[in-house]
Amino acid sequence: MIRELTSVFVAGYCIFLLVLVYKLTQGAETYGNLIAALKLPSSIMLHFITLAFVLYHTITWFNLTPKILVIYRGEERIPQGLVAGTFYAGWVMVSVFLAWLILGM
């Protein structure tokens, strides 16, 4: 039940990103006003809460998927831990790449 509730936060953040792109197309002043609003303590706290829910959603989804996605190699079933581990490894690699791209080219 909690994981389904976290979907609301995931969808809400997707809408926020669309609004952010829309404000970017409206000009520097409009975008600057939004960025100024994002620097408020309440906005920062909301982002941390959203981050916690999105991380919970991601972790539970990665743990749930191997139970649904049954993969066979020949007659042998690939262990659920290996499937979930592959998801986590991909997540880490993409996160490291994005951190490198954003923070320190």
Image (cartoon, helix red, strand yellow):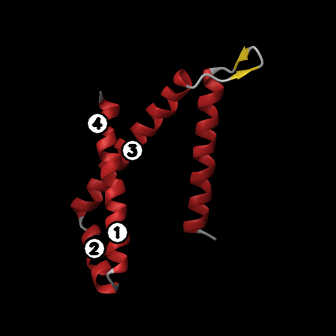
> Does residue 31 lie above or below 73 as drawn?
below
Helix, strand or loop for disc 3: helix
Earlier sequence position, callout 3 versus callout 4: 4
Q: Secondary structure at mark 1?
A: helix
The disc label shown at residue 54, or none: 3
Q: Which residue is denoted by mark 1 in the rendering?
A: 20
Q: Name the N-terminal-most of marks 4 and 1.
A: 4
Q: Residue at x 33, y 41 (%)?
A: 7
Residue 34, numbered circle:
2
Q: Is residue 56 left or right of residue 40?
A: right
Q: Residue placed farthest to the top in the image? A: 75
Q: Amino acid at mark 4?
A: Leu
Image coords of residue 56 (percent x, y): 40, 37
- Considering the numbered disc 2 on the image, is that residue within a helix, a strand or a loop? helix
Q: Are marks 1 and 2 in contact (CB under 8 Å)?
A: yes
Mark sitting earlier along the chain (2/3) = 2
Looking at marks 2 and 4 on the same chain, the residue that comes earlier in the sequence is marked by: 4
Give amino acid for label 1.
Leu
47 lies above or below 30: above
What residue would you read off at disc 4? 5
Say which residue appears at 34% left-offset and 42% top-offset. Answer: 53
Q: CA distance from mark 3 to mark 4?
A: 10 Å
